[in-house]
Image (cartoon, rainbow, N blue to C red):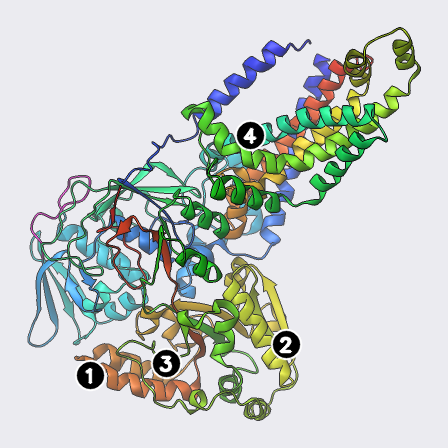
Amino acid sequence: MTAYLIRRVLATIPTMGIVAVFVFLLLHVTPGDPAAIIAGDNATPQNIAAIRERLGLDDPLWQQFLRWIFQLAQGDLGVSMFSNVPVSTLIMQRLEPTLSLALLSITLAVVLAIAAGVLAAWKAGRTLDRVVMGFAVFGFSVPVFVVGYLMIYLFAIELRWLPVQGYRPIAEGFWPWLRHLIMPATALGLAYVALIARITRASMLEVLAEDYVRTARAKGVATPPLLLKHALKNAAVPIVTVIGIGVALLISGVVITETVFNIPGIGRLTVDAINKRDYPIIQGVILVFSLVYVLVNLIVDVVYTLVDPRIRY
Amino acid sequence: MRFHRRHVIKTGAAAGALLGMGMPRLARAQDAGTIRAVMHGDLRVFDPIWTTANITAYHGAMIYDTLFGLDGNFDVRPQMVQDYGVSEDGLTWSFRLRDGLGFSDGTPVTTADVIPSIRRWAARDGAGQHMMRRVRDIVAKDERVFEIQLTEPYGLVIDSLAKTSTPLCYIMRRQEAETDPNEQITTFIGSGPFTFNQDLTQPGNRYVYDKNPNYVPRDDAPSGMAGAKIVKVDRVIWENIDDAQTAMAALQTGEIDFMETPPIDFLPMLEADPNLTVQVLNTLGNVGWLRLNFLHPPFDRVEARQAMMHLLNQEDFLRATFGNPQYFRTCGSYLTCGTPMESDVNMDWFTQGPNPERARELFAAAGYDGRPVTILQATNIPFMDNSAQIVAQKLRSIGINVELAASDWGGVVTRRAVQAPPAEGGWNIFITWGGGNSVASPINLSGHAATGTDGWFGWPSDELHEQLRDEWAAAPTLEARQEVSRRMQENAWNFVPHLYLGQWVAPVAHSARLSGILAIPEIVPFWNIEKSA
């Protein structure tokens, strides 16, 4: 297992290298000139040319690439072309809100979805099953921004229970942190509740039809332990896979949620950077995202061994 | 390798604490001492000389002061300057700084700071460059007195130093002012009413300004960018809320106090809220522009440019984006309507209304050969997006082949700089807007130049226009400038450097708890504002 983990971690290095090349090339073939955006609308072509030269954007692409890779090799993601703030500082400032939102969403989603999926499988074909599956279809179909605006209208404007927008770091207290995240996490998690509930139900239905479950039932095992101990544990592998995919998908899903609820996370940082063509930020954020994807996949593979002892690396 | 829940929880808690360290801690301040505002855009660049972005000019007005200021009546008044004068031959302007002026770090403001600040600003600004072509030298007489020595009399010396169109002539410390104008400064210390709190600022999220304890106000009452800029709160925070709907909800619930550009279609809802006030601060508003590329057919021919004047109706553009006529007006003047430079010379094309048949004839006279007219369409900015589609439709209606090149604004600003033919990555038309106050001055706005490929995008070229701009700048009185403006308009609507798509104002919405907001063209000030408990 240890050797496997070391191999997997080492494999991230060439993966990240390939990502770096693609990101750089993709950005530089996309139309857009940061110098023109920096200079502003009233700037003359001469002003823009001077800024472009100062930022090194006139240099041949290979020179710009080598400069960036050399920086990267020293652990330096560069500085924002606009604010002059180091990209690593910007990412660190934005990491906590995004991780908070993603973790709270996935926690809500996993708890609710597994309960709903297990219940739906237990009552398959009956009213409860139809209600859960109907909710799943709804959760999947309604865009996150629609849910977000409706929640803002109801809970923030009408009832004044929760704040419309913003984020409070957990260091300022658990309740202020949670108050600002309840609505965004619910809006974002809704689609994942639907996804995980459906997979849980399908996987549970398969397991509940197995001989050993019938045997357990015949031996008089009560329903709760039968569902949770005997069936759910054996249905866990596909559920863990979907949760893993969900975590990865959440990272992209946070972009809209962060915009609607004004959460200063990595999603908004990325969109802002793309709009203004701030290459160092875009490159840095995509590298970090890629690293997170790779790590999530690794964690999922490790979790397999915990839920299914037959799996060995 | 074995994993235990306890280890996972411990690791998670440690990671949480570590990540929390990256977030600056900002004291919650819903109190009367803090104003939270959502401005029209994100403050991307902090150096107000390096960029012409309006939001950076606002930022500059918070932390820097200017030598002169435009008051509420658009008159120039001394600001950092105590008194000034001009020699009889008009070649030497003398200025004496106010006594006791200091930067927020406690150092005094002297001519050693002022002169490089003027030079750095002039290197980047169109009006500054126009003035500097007539400047022999700027010399310090002592720590408080300096002179601008000219090679010929120039009527816009103090007007240029006072102008509110970007970039403004902000006075910085010598060490920042001596930075290469093409490089961004990294320290932001001024002698203005606020200080920039970089510790609590989070780029892209919020920008924090604290009251400057070392600010030395003038004795006279505040008016526009002139007079005493007395700060009546402890802190101003610009929250960057991208989504207008969310910002509006936050304004309604009191989470923010001020929203600079609420969407026009939501104004009735905000006006009906007794806790909010909707008001127009910038009465000159903005002027929509349609730029034509002089370098390539069909708009290299004057007939095709004149055809556009007969084809388009400003009201179509204004209604499509702003809806409510309370907030817009049509205007056929070359220099902004509502200013002393407004004129009605050579405006038959405007007063008679659109004439598509005439436009068709003029395109034929221009030798239009059926090649596509490429319109740059910035799809992420409603006015530009809507207007590009209207122009396309109008052109198609008279048989012109049109190609809409859709991209975000970032794509448009890149492509508009391309001088190659449209088929090789260039363009024929793009749409933007300028501040009404800037458009009123033939010198302040880069887009008024008609200097060909050295000028602003579209590269109009006309010798008479350039001669008239120089005459306007040298004119000694308002009446003389108005007379030149009329001749300039006569000529402009003959050679058609560009077209206007109408004029509109953008009201701000704010909490009824705020009072004392000053009306300044192109700048939103936060001094003089009181916030009741």
Q: Quadrant of the N terminus of chain A?
A: top right
Gap in angstroms between the C-alphas marked 1 and 4 = 63 Å
Gap in angstroms between the C-alphas marked 3 and 2 = 27 Å
Gap in angstroms between the C-alphas marked 1 and 3 = 17 Å
- Mark number displayed over residue B334: 3
Residue picked out by circle 1:
B479
Q: Residue furthest top?
A: A219
- In this rendered view, identify the residue nearer to me: B291 or B394: B394
How many numbered discs?
4
Q: Amino acid at mark 3?
A: Tyr
Q: Amino acid at mark 2?
A: Val
Q: Residues within 10 Å of mark 4 (few under 14, many from 20)?
A: some
For the residues labelled 1 and 4, say whether their Cβ atoms are less than 8 Å apart: no
Q: Is residue A218 above or below residue B361?
A: above
Indicate the quadrant where residue B163 lies.
bottom left
Query: Label 1's element?
Result: helix
Question: Where does residue B278 sit, x and y in percent of width and height?
Answer: 36, 58
- In this rendered view, identify the residue nearer to me: A40 or B136: A40
The stretch in magenta equals B97-108
- Mark number displayed over residue A99: 4
